[in-house]
Image (tube, rainbow, N blue to C red):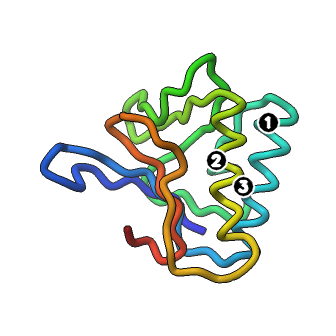
Amino acid sequence: MHLDYIDQINEYGDNIVRLYDFNHSEADKFRRIVHQTVVVNNKPLDLSTIDFIEARNCRLTLRISDEDKGITTSGNNRFFCDLTIPGYEKMIMLLDQFCSHETKGYQYLYDIDSQTDFLFSPAGSW
């Protein structure tokens, strides 16, 4: 599984942080780690610390917030995904389709009007 950042993917200047190049087993492990660390233990999760994720040109930390803000940056390709617990529970449900069988589909992991989207895509495309 790879993590990277792509800037200005369209004429509106939108960006993507994406997780890609994975199979259903890795998707399931990722879903379980997010659930246990963020939802159950209420702790932040730096995705670059997960042994099967290779962070290519950015780092992303999932954090609990009082409101769903999506992905923001502190600069230097360091990103933070700030969602409420219900926001992360919805994200986990969106991951389900990738965990039981191989698929070529993709999914944005939240529906928030923000500059940077969070893409989950086995093939890396959208």
Residue at 86 percent across and 32 percent down: it is: 41
Q: CA distance from mark 1 to mark 2?
A: 11 Å
Circle nearer the viewer, 3 or 1: 1
Residue at 40 percent across and 41 percent down: it is: 77
Circle nearer the viewer, 1 or 2: 2
Please say if 26 is above or below 65.
below
Identified by mark 3, the residue type is Ile
Identified by mark 1, the residue type is Val
Residue on which disc 2 sits: 91
Circle nearer the viewer, 2 or 3: 2
Q: SS class of the residue under badge 1?
A: helix
Q: SS class of the residue under badge 3?
A: loop
Residue on which disc 1 sits: 39
Q: CA distance from mark 2 to mark 3?
A: 18 Å
Residue at 59 percent across and 80 percent down: it is: 103
Please say if 122 is above or below 33.
below
In screen coordinates, is 101 left or right of 55?
Answer: right
Instruction: Check disc 1: other Cα within 10 Å, few if <14, some if 14-19, many if 20+.
Output: many
- Residue 12: x and y in percent read 16, 44
In screen coordinates, is 54 left or right of 34?
Answer: left
- The quadrant the C terminus occupies is bottom left
| Of the image marks 2 and 3, the number of the one nearer the N terminus | 3
- Residue 102: x and y in percent read 65, 83
- The quadrant the N terminus occupies is bottom right
- Residue 17: x and y in percent read 44, 51
Residue on which disc 3 sits: 50
Q: CA distance from mark 3 to mark 1?
A: 17 Å
Please say if 113 is above or below 123.
above
Please say if 92 is above or below 116.
below
Res. 38 image quadrant: top right
